[in-house]
Image: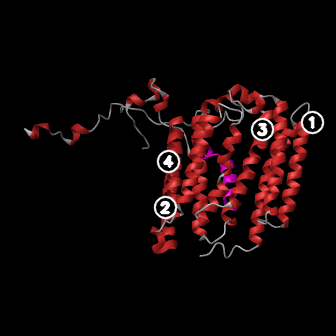
Amino acid sequence: MITSNLMSDSDRKPDAQQPEAGIRLTEAQLRARRSRSIAIGIALGLLALLFYIVTLVKGPGVLERPL
Amino acid sequence: MSLTFVPAELSGEQGVDPSIAPSIAGARDYLELMKPRVMSLVVFTALVGLVLAPGHVHPVIGLTALICIAVGAGASGALNMWYDADIDARMARTAARPIPAGRLRPGEALAFGLTLGGFSVAVLGLLVNVVAATLLALTIGFYVLVYTMWLKRSTPQNIVIGGAAGALPPIIGWASVTGGVSLEPVLLFLIIFMWTPPHFWALALYRKDDYARAGVPMLPVVAGDGPTRRQILLYTLILAPLGVAPWFMGYAGAAYGVAAIAGGAGMIALALRILAEKDGFKASKQMFAFSILYLFLLFAVLLADRMSGGLVGHFAT
């Protein structure tokens, strides 16, 4: 039966007494990841802004790319 | 709670390959990977090519071109550091770079370099023009594939031929405005091309032990100090008149001519001192420092010369 294969929410939760599997990032790794995330966010934001401004500047000519 | 979990098999603490452990590389390490000092000289020479070019360019498009050229130069630097990590680790001058210092893994540098290179070329092609994008792709490819992967470890002519990559930015800047190439930017290319050997051989003279330890066949390592000193003088004797050529051919004003003659005379005087120097490398160190000033001076005066002629019409909106 389908219902017999379903687990309750409590079945899915890890046991609070058991340490979770895997590793815990060190403070240095967390800081590094945060700085990378911020840098990627800024870079993507600037790229989007650049395309937006160039589209405004070029107007309909934005699709014209003569060799 | 700021906990992050990854599968247990990736844990460095459990004796697993550290190459797949969580990264400790910060944004600053990635910035260092782009060789910001080299990048600044590339951007400056590209700016001069862009400003000297005839015709009009919108300031936003000009700025876009410079950003793409800067990012492309950064990509070249990252890919160079990825490939040369083994050499960098053996040289005092480069041992603290992110990869040999263990702050950044080679795979991260490779992915970063390829991403930057791809984006810089694509954005330049989409927003500026295809000729400039093609030249940028050629520059990155030449620096990484021809210079870094092939010439650097195989011939003392490495920096002579490889110098072409560093000399191309003014042509890319010019092509960003005109969509083509003509004699003037080629002249700027030749000046940087002929400037590269005396600049790097002056460095190699007093760093030759470093290069020898790393197995890089720089001219002083392979041929010795005497032939290197003579080659520095030879290239400088070609460079000095070439530096004056933009004035002689009417592309620049008298101020440039004076600066080029004075700078060229300074370069020749230092090259002669290097040739005469029997002990120590004082003149070599002076030549290395002065050559940077010389190139900067030539391009700065060219820029000032053009700006005094008025840039209002150039950066037309």
Q: Are marks 1 and 4 on the same chain?
A: yes
**Where B208 sits versus B72, above or below?**
above
Q: Would you say B309 lies left or right of B267 here?
A: left
Above or below, comparing residue B127 to residue B157 in the picture:
below
Asked if labels 3 and 4 share a chain, the reply is yes
Rendered location of residue B131, percent (x, y): 55, 59
> Is residue B98 something one can see in this rendering?
no
Q: Quadrant of the C terminus of chain B?
A: bottom right
Residue B253 rendering spot, x and y as whole percentages = 81, 67
CB atoms at circles 3 and 4 under 8 Å apart?
no
Q: What amino acid is labelled 4 in the image?
A: Thr
Q: Could you tell which of marks 3 and 2 lies nearer the N-terminus?
A: 2
Secondary element under disc 4, as helix, strand or loop, is helix
Residue at numbered disc 4: B115
Name the kind of residue labelled 3 in the image: Trp
2 vs 4, front mark:
2
Q: Tell me the CA gap for discs 2 and 1.
A: 53 Å
Q: Is B143 rendered above or below residue B227?
A: below
**Which residue does the numbered mark 1 point to in the structure image?**
B276
Q: Residue at x 50, y 72 (%)?
A: A58
Q: Chain of mark 4?
A: B
Q: Earlier in the sequence, mark 2 or mark 1?
A: 2
Looking at this view, name the residue that lies furthest to the top: B15
Q: Mark 3: which secondary structure?
A: helix
> If you read the primary sequence from the N terminus, does the residue marked by circle 3 or circle 1 appear first?
3
The label nearer to you, 3 versus 4, is 3
Magenta stretch containing residue B31, yes or no? yes
Magenta residues span: B29-48
Q: Is residue B151 visible?
A: yes
Q: Are marks 3 and 2 in one subunit?
A: yes
Read off the residue under disc 3. Answer: B201
